[in-house]
Image (spheres, helix red, strand yellow):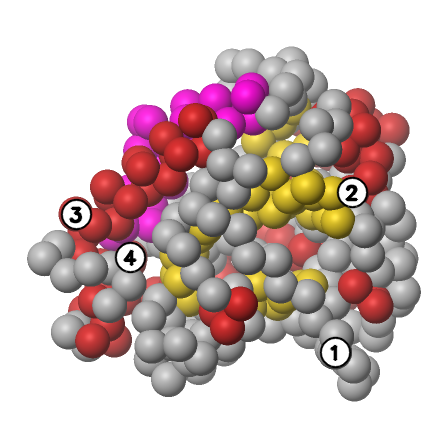
Amino acid sequence: MDVHIDVGYSPDKMRTRIYRGEIVILSATPATKALVDHARALIEAAFAPHDPRHAHEHLSVAECVEILTRLKPHFIHHADTQKLLRQVLLEYGCDPQKTYQDVPRLRVAYPSNFLTSGIAYAHHVHRDTWFSAPKSQINWWMPIYQFLPEQGMAFHPQYWNRSIANDSDQFNYYQWNAVGRKNAAKEIGKDTRAQPHPQEPLNLEPQVCFVVPPGGTIVFSAAQLHSTIPNSTDWSRWSIDFRTVDIDDVVARTGAPTDDSRCTGTSLRDFKRMADFAPMPEEIAESYDTGLLGAGVAVYRPEANLLTEESVG
Ligand SMILES: [Fe+2]
């Protein structure tokens, strides 16, 4: 796996590299620092008077879940969040007419003996393309506070462009929107929601974790095999992640090589144009529609502030 650090590629060149399985690491910028400061302010207000990294030492699992159930959608739908994210992408040179962004998600990885399911789900090994992401999807991952490899995110580069038996054929994005997402807060102790898993033994070593400072960003393909490292420290890790697609790549079906995704439905309708937050043109999303909508929901809409907006992948 090649890793490019602050090389200064154009966004077009960066995507080409990422589609080959390479990873791009970007230093913190004024815009990412502003996004991090915004996230910190909301997190710290929600957990006051506790330090959010240690709040679980003072609160029960149920109390943390209750706070997160309000905090996560508050962050996602806050008027400043999407604007700050657009600023991040502008600063990296993304074309606002061609780049589509989804909403950034707030993640917390608690010490593994505290809470690892539902709203603080510790992601098992997966590719986002098993969860209805297009193969041109680019993932951006940014820590909000300093963190250690013992609580980070792992890549498993030996499985790049190598098929893995998996049960993504059981996953339909519209059903997930209808049921799985809104039930995240109820999944305490064990996560019972149907999510694609590998169906063969994997050799996950060596795994690679990149440690970047707050506001630094790890940029990678949705087809990378990755997972949450069980947090073996006694404090929680906080991060933001979001996704982008380039509309030309979506139309041309350019992207990572992927031939082990059997899921149905598409997450393309979650993406909005950077310039004006216009929706993904329906005819383009429709051209990716592999699953019947049935009783499902094409675009997840949380009810007021009561539901979380837990993304997949
Ligand atoms: Fe993921």
* Residue located 68% across and 66% down the image: 208
For discs 4 and 3, the disc positioned in front in the rendered view: 3
Quadrant showing the N terminus: bottom right
Quadrant showing the C terminus: bottom right
SS of the residue under disc 4: helix
Q: Which residue in the protein does label 1 denote? A: 205
Boundaries of the magenta span:
70-91
3D distance between C-alphas at marks 2 and 4: 33 Å
Left or right, 21 with reference to 92: right
Q: Amino acid at mark 2?
A: Ile
For label 3, the crowd category at 10 Å Cα-Cα, with few meaning under 14, some 14 to 19 and many 20 or more, is: few
Does label 1 or label 2 sit earlier along the sequence?
Answer: 2
* Residue located 74% across and 57% down the image: 224
3D distance between C-alphas at marks 1 and 4: 34 Å
Does label 2 or label 4 sit earlier along the sequence?
Answer: 2
Residue 276, placed above or below residue 261:
above
Q: Position of residue 80 (x, y in %)?
A: 33, 27
Does label 1 or label 4 sit earlier along the sequence?
Answer: 4
Residue 182 visible in rendering: no
Does label 4 or label 3 sit earlier along the sequence?
Answer: 3
3D distance between C-alphas at marks 3 and 2: 36 Å
